[in-house]
Amino acid sequence: MREKIFILGSSGLLGRNLCHYLKKYYQIIGHINKRSVYLDGIKTVSFDFFNKNELNKFLIKYRPDIIINSTGITNVEECEKDKPKAYKVNVKINGLFSSLSNKYNFKFISISTDHLHGNNPRKKFSEKDITSPINYYAFTKIKSEKLILQNSDNSLILRTNFFGNGFHYRKSFSDQIIEKLINSEKVFLFKDVFFNPVLIAEFAYILKRLIKKNISGILNVSSDEKISKYRFGLMIAKTLNLNSRLISPITLSSKKKLKKRPKNMALDNSVLKKILKIKKISLLNQLKKLKYEKKINKFLPY
């Protein structure tokens, strides 16, 4: 019998895509919020995580082998505006499920972020580098990581930044760029903010392999190339044959109303590649795959 995976945040950008990819290999149960979302061929449930009776009843009835938490408030401004809500969603849910993982014998996997470090412009940050949050969103993610590791030795935390096909109610960063270019709208992107994001399909493929190997601890999941958000937009335009002249570079300091953000979020993926024996995680190859996904209007696993 296939292992059973419970995915928290199944109506979100990452969670919904993970449901559709992983259902080929596992029994999937998706937790959805009040938003009406149809997940083809996937059993869904909806209950309050913090209702102990409902949560225990679910865990006893379904006995998931793995629980993946893809929930989270990722909007930096929203986290600053409503800190209690951000703490509840970004920290308490992770603390709750990681604390129950030993009792109910499931592996807990949590999706973290790349907003965790300072602004050393020459660096790709490894899993061992000291974190230094500069906004409340980053603080909640670091607090969450520490809590998970305290509660469970068998948990897996994946630091990442992803792009790919979203949905009408939840667009990805690449979706926003592509739609504006298609509509002949100007796109302004930071030339001084660097990251190395990964396509959702690539992330799902990597996740499946990590599950099979039963990897635990903290792991970076990223592409090889450290790139500015401006250059990333140009790569999208070139790969998808869109008008790159609509894209203009701006600096982070020009957006004075934005809460403070790190300028360098690039993650060192060498540990991941060593574990999975991967030679290259090419951003260009992933953008080519995104182009094909857009063409056939379908999420494609690797």
Image (cartoon, rainbow, N blue to C red):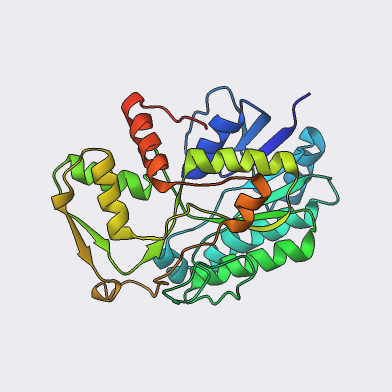
Q: Is residue 12 visible?
A: no
Please tell me which residue is depicted at 39% across the width and 75% down the height of the picture. Answer: 260
Left or right of 169 on screen, residue 51: right
Please tell me which residue is depicted at 47% across the width and 63% down the height of the picture. Answer: 266
Q: Nearer the viewer, residue 118 or 19?
A: 118
**In the picture, residue 296 is in which quadrant?**
top left
Q: Nearer the viewer, residue 278 or 52?
A: 278
**In the picture, residue 10 is in which quadrant?**
top right
- The relative height of residue 31 versus residue 100 in the rendered view (above or below) is above
Task: Identify the residue at the far right of this view.
Answer: 103
- The relative height of residue 271 versus residue 302 in the rendered view (above or below) is below
Q: Is residue 39 visible?
A: yes
Residue 150 in the image: state x and y as whole percent. Answer: 77, 66
Residue 242 in the image: state x and y as whole percent. Answer: 20, 41
- The relative height of residue 68 versus residue 217 in the rendered view (above or below) is above
Residue 16 in the image: state x and y as whole percent. Answer: 51, 37
Please tell me which residue is depicted at 73% across the width and 53% down the height of the picture. Answer: 216
Left or right of 67 on screen, residue 253: left
Left or right of 38 on screen, residue 130: right
Residue 35 in the image: state x and y as whole percent. Answer: 47, 39
| Image quadrant containing the N terminus | top right
Please tell me which residue is depicted at 48% across the width and 52% down the height of the picture. Answer: 223
